[in-house]
Image: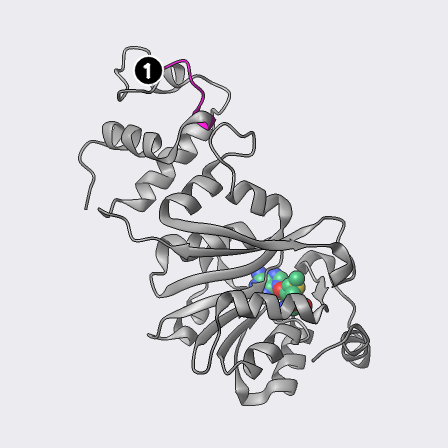
Amino acid sequence: MQSLTDIRNLLEARGLKPLKQFGQNFLHDQNQIHRLIEAAGVGPGDRVLEIGPGTGALTEALLDAGAEVVACEIDMGLSDLVAERFEDRVQLVRGDCLETGRSLSRNVVEALGDKPWSLVANLPYQVASPVMIDLLMHHPRCHGQFVTIQKEVADRLLSPPGNKTRGPLGILASTFGSIERIGVIPPTCFWPQPKVVSAMVALKPLELEQEIDRQAFARFVTMLFSSRRKQLGRILGRDRELPVGIDPSWRPDVLTNEQLMALFNQEEGPRRL
Ligand code: SAM
């Protein structure tokens, strides 16, 4: 178990300081760490990806629960710290967890291997949205994501139709997955304290009744929301007949997931795989 003093001492002993550019706000509240692990249901032999192990507070708790941990850390000083502390008990990938800013790095995918796995992490805020969407859309072996993120991102993930925070992130997450808020975490649980409130969420993949071209759906939703203030009739063409129940005077953010899917199918023709 790592206390706040332990975390400070571990960094100080190596001449390290929390770096803002890597979103280094260390979670030192043990209750919150265990809440995350419990929500993820981590047990002996489960493979877990931790993005950003930092000083290893969550890593240690995952190992105590019996998980096989693959950890990816971008900060070389912290990577050395993790390697020293856990040696071969953790499979460490040094470097950015993302390639081209939006796909899980090949080194991480390789380290995870063929077994199903889940993501359990206190995610750095810069990578939270791209990581979560990439895992949901392109990594069928990932059977759940249990993460701490900014509350504002959690609100967007959970945003219903008609809400001003509704957008592609929440629509893709709720079309291809089910999202649940585990809880809200105040800044005092972290060191240094972030300026914003955080939240823990669980995102689990859903099996669609009929598989679709997910990439094309994502492009369609992104295209609609790039003109979110325009009416559908203006975005899609005035003379186009829309599916039953959809009015051309509506703006994209009032559409339900089902209505978006109906529009997508009409727009793209028979795209089902
Ligand atoms: N897991 C630790 C905890 O719970 O206290 C640290 C979490 S801290 C919010 C985020 C961690 O992610 C830091 O260790 C940071 O260096 C690392 N990180 C930031 N960007 C990253 C990236 N693109 N790829 C891998 N690790 C990254």
Determine the residue positioned at 41% across, 70% down. Answer: 117
15 falls in the magenta region: no
In x, y percent, where is residue 18? Answer: 76, 65
What residue sits right under mark 1 in the picture? 237
Compare residues 94 and 241 and report the one nearer the observer. 241
Compare residues 247 and 265 and report the one nearer the observer. 247
Q: Quadrant of the N terminus?
A: bottom right
Tell me if 18 is positioned left or right of 66 in this view: right
The vertical placement of 199 against 266, above or below, is: below
The vertical placement of 58 against 25, above or below, is: below
* Magenta residues, dominant SS class: loop
Residue 187, picture quadrant: bottom right
Residue density around tag 1, few if under 14, some if 14–19, many if 20 or more, within 10 Å: few
The vertical placement of 189 against 130, above or below, is: below
* Part of the protein shown in magenta: 248-253
250 falls in the magenta region: yes
In x, y percent, where is residue 53? Answer: 61, 71
In x, y percent, where is residue 249? Answer: 41, 13
Compare residues 222 and 57 and report the one nearer the observer. 57
Residue 34, picture quadrant: bottom right
